[in-house]
Image: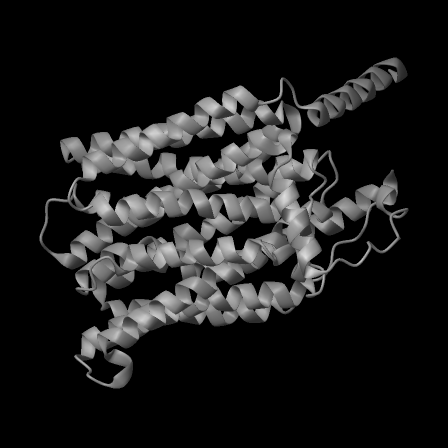
Amino acid sequence: MERDQQIRKSNFLKVLYLGFCNMTLFICYSAGQNLMTSLYDQLDYGNLGQINFFMIYIGVATASLVSTYYYKKIPTKTGLLLGAFVHINLVIAGAIATYCKLYNSETMVCQPGFIYIWNLGSGFWLGFGAAFFWLYQGVYINACADESVRGTFNGVATAILTISGILSSSIATFALGRTDQFTFYCILLMFGGLSMILFALVQPPLPYSEMKEKTEEPAQETLAESIQSFLKALRTQKSLFLFIVIAFSGAAISFYCTYLSIAIKSTIISEDEKEINQNTAFVFILLSLGGVTAGLSIGKLADKYNKITILGFTMIILEAALIVTLIAMLFGSYKISMLAGVLWGYGDTSINTMINVVIGSRFNASPETFSAYRFLAAIGCMFTTTVGILIAKSAPTFYIIIVAASLLALHNFYFKYVPNDDDSTQKLLQTQEEKVTLEMKNL
């Protein structure tokens, strides 16, 4: 319908704008996150970076239990603004830590106890707010799309977000090579402030024709009933294959978030901290380029081919990234670590895009399923992070082997429960074939 085409164009612009908001926010957050473990190690805070990630995942898991209930009560714009702020707050924690180290300050905020409490508290609230932030994002983007462009819209939104990694890592490469760590964090915070202004201007998507009939308000649930609905969604048999992929993605992506910078550092033959930080940041630029490529390609493939098959393929990419990382460490090869960065970026963006596409296509963009997504991803992340805190420094190779074995086990379970075909994709292909047949007849 002509009206739906106009709505699709209007909603696509909204997706582009939301992607730009995310890009600005994650210019602030991405480099701070990616370099957190190595920078904090240089600042003599030990495993604080990894423990911080653990607190983030606890926050995500906790919030996922109640996010569906409060999602129905908190406006989208408010949820996005709160989610953006908690991301920025973690960067503020990094700025405080680097300020204290740079100026050898002994004020109250620079006491080790305060630094730890601020960071761990910021990590928890980041995770708690992020569960809402990504729930609003997932529902918003899928509301902007209909079935024919769901993959493209999700892919483009993720690609724009991933550009932030290139810009953020470029800033890190420049700033950490020419100035101090505190100045680097201050530059990131400027982008964080800009993102808050941009999120305040987000507009709601326009509904498509087939959605007009859905005007009835859903029955009001109590918090207890909402948690029961969430737990019921976790036990749904038809969702099991998706939940396995989600746990897989959490375990894999947590590895590169908490350990990749350390793995890269082990392949750099230098004792100059600025050179090490520059080279590490450059690998994360390549990681982001891989992510942008995935965002622009994987969504379009999802709109044309079997969504479930592509979802399974993304798991293989992340497994390959882990193997290449291990090879880079064993041979001490920085060049191989660059290839690992590209694979991690492509795999991360691909699997998250496809999870969002499948939730939108097969589960009608259900808020409960999006909440389950964040909850199970956090569980996978906590597993990898916990093992990393315990043995990553003392036995790095054994740590990678444990992660690899876990991913292979989850992949095996995926094959056991994956459906034979993607009904929604088959319906879309059938519709496209009918259109082609009709056009041929008209010719």
The answer to whether 66 appears left or right of 121 in the picture is: right
The answer to whether 123 appears left or right of 211 in the picture is: left
Q: Quadrant of residue 428?
A: top right
Task: Name which residue lies at 57% across and 37% down.
Answer: 355
Q: Can residue 30 be seen in this view?
A: yes
Q: Quadrant of the N terminus?
A: top right
Task: Name which residue lies at 29% across and 58% down.
Answer: 49
Task: Name which residue lies at 66% across and 23% down.
Answer: 422
The answer to whether 222 appears left or right of 347 in the picture is: right
Q: Position of residue 118 (x, y in %)?
A: 35, 72
Q: Position of residue 111 (x, y in %)?
A: 23, 78
Q: Quick check: 156 above or below 276?
A: above
Q: What is the basis of the colouring in this image?
A: one colour
Task: Name which residue lies at 47% across and 38% down.
Answer: 247
Q: Where is residue 200 in the image (x, y as percent from the top left)?
A: 63, 69
Q: In which quarter of the image is residue 302?
A: top right
Q: Quick check: 381 above or below 435?
A: below
Q: How many labels does the image show?
A: 0
Q: Quick check: 225 above or below 419?
A: below
Q: Position of residue 96 (x, y in %)?
A: 30, 75
Q: In which quarter of the image is the C terminus?
A: top right
Of the pair 102 and 130, the residue shown nearer to us: 130
Of the pair 338 and 90, the residue shown nearer to us: 90
The answer to whether 123 appears left or right of 97 in the picture is: right
